[in-house]
């Protein structure tokens, strides 16, 4: 933390001013991440907190780094930068929303608590079903090799009792919107692939699903299902 504080001292503004900027970034991150159901936070939005009143070059980067350090030491969160999505081939067209996301740096908050402690003391019952849905979808996509046609994905979700036409699910409301939420949260990305029979919509694993920690948890999830019922995850 001392290194970040030393870096901030070079910009010719008072400690009170820099502390205020760091606090504003931290508040914004915590509020936005929970308000938007875990959707990524754009670096541009964090930068604007600093640049709206200050023009010093690299000040925003130093403030964000200091905020990242305090989020870790005080709140137990890792402000993790998402890696950019893989580049499409000429035969593929990234949908506009996914392309927009891929073109800008963004962050997510990842708890640093051990998973057992996190589940016991942090996870709310209301969010548990969405977590289960997330891992079920990611498991299907991963078993398909990391990429799956939309119709095939819904075929397997229907086998779990989740129909794309259901807009009154007692937990999710619209099942289609629940799937779209995984795109907004950058667990999945959508691509249109041109073929002889026209365009086919594919879902493939995005940055957060490719993260080593998440990927390992998905593999554990798959292993548990395979022990109990192979037919649930059999991709035919």
Image: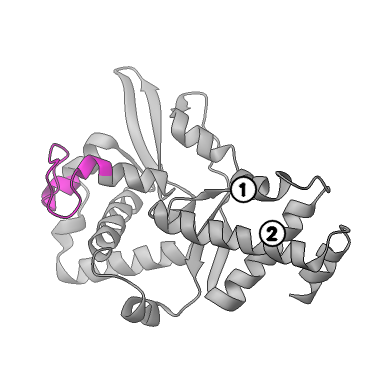
Q: Which residue is identified by label 2?
A: 21
In-front residue for pair 181/164: 181
Q: Point out residue 5 in the picture as x, y percentages from the top left corner.
A: 79, 70
Does the magenta run of residues contain 234? Answer: no
- Say which quarter of the image contains residue 68: bottom right
Q: Is residue 221 depicted above or below 133 in this figure?
A: below
Q: Which mark is residue 130?
A: none
In-front residue for pair 187/15: 15
Please report the residue visible at 35 percent of the width from the left and 53 percent of the height from the top.
142
Secondary element at image label 2: helix
Mark-to-mark CA distance, 1 and 2: 15 Å
- Say which quarter of the image contains residue 221: bottom left
Q: Point out residue 44 in the picture as x, y percentages from the top left corner.
A: 63, 43
Question: What segment is highlighted magenta in the picture?
Answer: 156-177
Badge 2: how crowded within 10 Å, few (<14), some, or many (20+)? some
Q: Quadrant of the C terminus?
A: top left
Q: Is residue 199 depicted above or below 153 in this figure?
A: above
Q: Is residue 199 depicted above or below 172 in this figure?
A: above
- Say which quarter of the image contains residue 192: top left
Give the mark nearest the N terminus, 1 or 2: 2
Please report the residue visible at 66 percent of the width from the left and 70 percent of the height from the top.
69
Secondary element at image label 1: helix
Left/right placement of residue 129 relative to residue 186 reads left
Please report the residue visible at 82 percent of the width from the left and 64 percent of the height from the top.
14
In-front residue for pair 185/195: 185
Dominant secondary-structure state across the stretch colored magenta: loop
Please report the residue visible at 54 percent of the width from the left and 58 percent of the height from the top.
29
Left/right placement of residue 21 relative to residue 114 reads right
Q: Which mark is residue 43?
A: 1
Q: Quadrant of the N terminus?
A: bottom right
């Amino acid at each position: 933390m001392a290194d970040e504080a030393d870096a901030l001292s070079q910009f010719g503004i008072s400690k009170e001013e820099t502390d205020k900027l760091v606090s504003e970034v931290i508040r914004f991150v915590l509020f936005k991440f929970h308000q938007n159901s875990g959707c990524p936070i754009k670096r541009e939005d964090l930068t604007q907190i600093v640049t709206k009143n200050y023009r010093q070059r690299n000040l925003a980067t130093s403030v964000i780094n200091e905020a990242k350090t305090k989020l870790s030491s005080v709140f137990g969160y890792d402000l993790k930068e998402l890696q950019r999505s893989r580049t499409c081939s000429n035969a593929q067209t990234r949908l506009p929303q996914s392309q927009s996301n891929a073109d800008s740096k963004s962050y997510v908050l990842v708890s640093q608590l051990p998973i057992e402690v996190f589940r016991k003391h942090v996870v709310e019952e209301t969010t548990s079903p969405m977590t289960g849905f997330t891992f079920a979808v990611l498991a299907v996509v991963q078993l398909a090799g990391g990429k799956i046609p939309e119709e095939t994905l819904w075929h397997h979700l229907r086998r779990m009792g989740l129909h794309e036409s259901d807009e009154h699910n007692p937990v999710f409301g619209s099942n289609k919107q629940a799937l779209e939420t995984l795109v907004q949260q950058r667990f999945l990305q959508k691509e249109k692939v041109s073929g002889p029979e026209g365009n086919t919509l594919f879902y493939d694993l995005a940055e957060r699903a490719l993260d080593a920690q998440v990927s390992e948890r998905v593999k554990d999830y798959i292993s548990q299902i395979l022990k109990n019922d192979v037919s649930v995850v059999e991709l035919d």
